[in-house]
Image (cartoon, coloured by chain):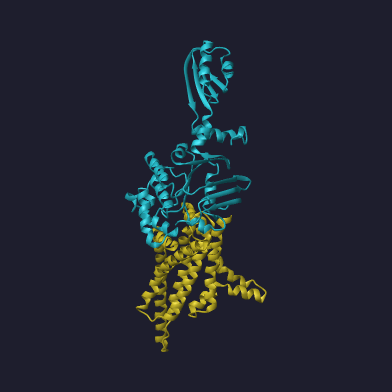
Chain colours: A yellow, B cyan
Amino acid sequence: MIAGKDLRNIFMSPLFYVVAAVCSLVWWFLFIVRVNEFLQHSAMLAYQAAMSGGEQQGLPLHYYVVLSHLYAVNLVMIFAVSAITMRLFTEEKRNRTYDLLLTAPVTATEITVGKLIAGTLTAWALLGIALIYPLSLGFFADMDWGSFISSFLGIMLLTAGYVSIGMFASSLTQSLVVAVILAPILNIVLWFVGALAEGASHPTTRQIFEHLNVAIHLGNFMKGNVGISSTVFLLSVVFLFGFLTQRVVESSRWR
Amino acid sequence: MTTSTSAPTPMIEVRELSKAYGPHKAIDRISFSVKKGEVVGFLGPNGAGKTTTMKIITGFMPPTSGVAKVAGFDVFEDPIEVKKRIGYLPETPPVYGEMTVESYLKFVARLKGVEKSRVKTLVERAIERTELGNVRHRLIQNLSKGYRQRVGISQALVSEPDVLILDEPTVGLDPRQVAEVRTLIKELAGEHTVILSTHILPEVQATCERIIIINKGKIVAEDSLESLGRRMKSSVRVYLRVGELKDGLKEQLQAVPGVHSVTNKGESFEIDTDGSKDVAQQIAARVVSSGAGLLELREEAFNLEDVFLKLTTSEENQPGAAV
């Protein structure tokens, strides 16, 4: 119910379309550049192969174009998702409609889950736009569909994590600006937690930090292996920040 | 949604309720109860603690200490049960600007737990009651303040709750709409229990059966409209104007039995009396016998305005004496 209302409000607002337009512009540009590079390199390789009389070896399309596209998508999503999620709670507080939600017979969990669903579906709609580019490639080239789908799944899960983090940031403040700055900072911190492994001296701490490395888990998906541990890791990011948000909402009852 | 609570249980019960923001006490050990179907006016100057009390009853914020119960459910222990039974209009109407009036009311109805099959009927009725028919398909952000306020009232009504809590319901409305809302509130009495807050006196006079006057976080008076008025009838103010000011006239007037105080500005006197029957007559007789020349004499009973001012301002001078 709340999810439906939020979804409608997100799609009714110009903000979503601006974000979507900017995203597709950035992705389009990076994607074209990458495809061009790929074509030049393959042509060069084909030429070299012809000259040396050896066998022709194609470049792996998945690694060369699709993955770099997905990394660009991920980078953009860190900011795009924040722009969408910033309104989830701050807007309610500014409009005073938060009073309505908090005096309605719904629990803090229902409010949080509703908003998480709305935010995630919106973010996935953006991903749908991102999907167009590699799909269009499928008409002309042999794609490694298995790896492609698993990579995309990974991005979807990670994006849900960004939504959860963004929602948490938005629940903390009344100001859109604070929310939209805090969310990407938290997202980026998420990426750098894994980097702490470099500095850890004890093997166990090192292992822990390695497990918290988003890059490794996303990398697993990218390589085409959908592992339980990586799935659980990404889902637990969603749950952790969802839980924190629920606590923040609940706290208004006793604070 | 009807409750199965037996008749003697009050619909709203508030006991020893306090809320402190740091050292500042917004409300201080307030107790009152409201019977089912009653309309109670919450009256007080701005910042007296009206909104705070209402927010606690709606379960929006917790009290520092004390108990608030709605239909027998503790606000803090069973917030969901309480919230099901309450329609709340906060100071600022909680509307989504990017929704149309109708879709917003549908959303609120669903949010309040109305079954899907009844939503349409209830939304229709709420729209009809608050006369929003001609703007139902417009976006709320394009509506005027008065219409938004009505959407806010409509929103509180839509789930047909047992208890309506309206925080300054007529703010921002034009005089005709104010009259309409007051009529609406009167209609609601009986089937709904209503608490409304205001700092506008005629509003209470027009709508409420009972008023609770609150000042600086404390209840200074709680009574039915008539008996508060009656209580104040016991003091009558006499206005007097004489032709020429004679020495000793003030003292003579002061000596009239039943006169509390005499103040004068030149030839005009204001005399506070205890309202006994012949006090005005006696004053007239004194003036005439003194040869000052009686030009004007009229009696004026205190109205609610005076009651209110007296109760909310007397506290500094004589603490605790007001009740």
The image shows residue B184 at horizontal and vertical percentages of 40, 45
| Towards the viewer: A243 or B264 | B264
Number of numbered discs: 0
The image shows residue B287 at horizontal and vertical percentages of 52, 14
Quarter where residue A20 is shown: bottom left
Name the residue at the left extreme.
B134
Name the residue at the front extreme.
B7
Q: Is residue A185 left or right of residue A11?
A: right
Name the residue at the top extreme.
B291
Q: Is residue A61 left or right of residue A164?
A: left
- Placement of B241 over or under B183, stated as above or below: above
| Towards the viewer: A223 or B195 | B195
| Towards the viewer: A72 or B123 | B123
The image shows residue B222 at horizontal and vertical percentages of 54, 40
Name the residue: 44% across, 81% down.
A146
The image shows residue A24 at horizontal and vertical percentages of 40, 66
| Towards the viewer: A177 or A42 | A177
- Placement of B162 over or under B263, stated as above or below: below
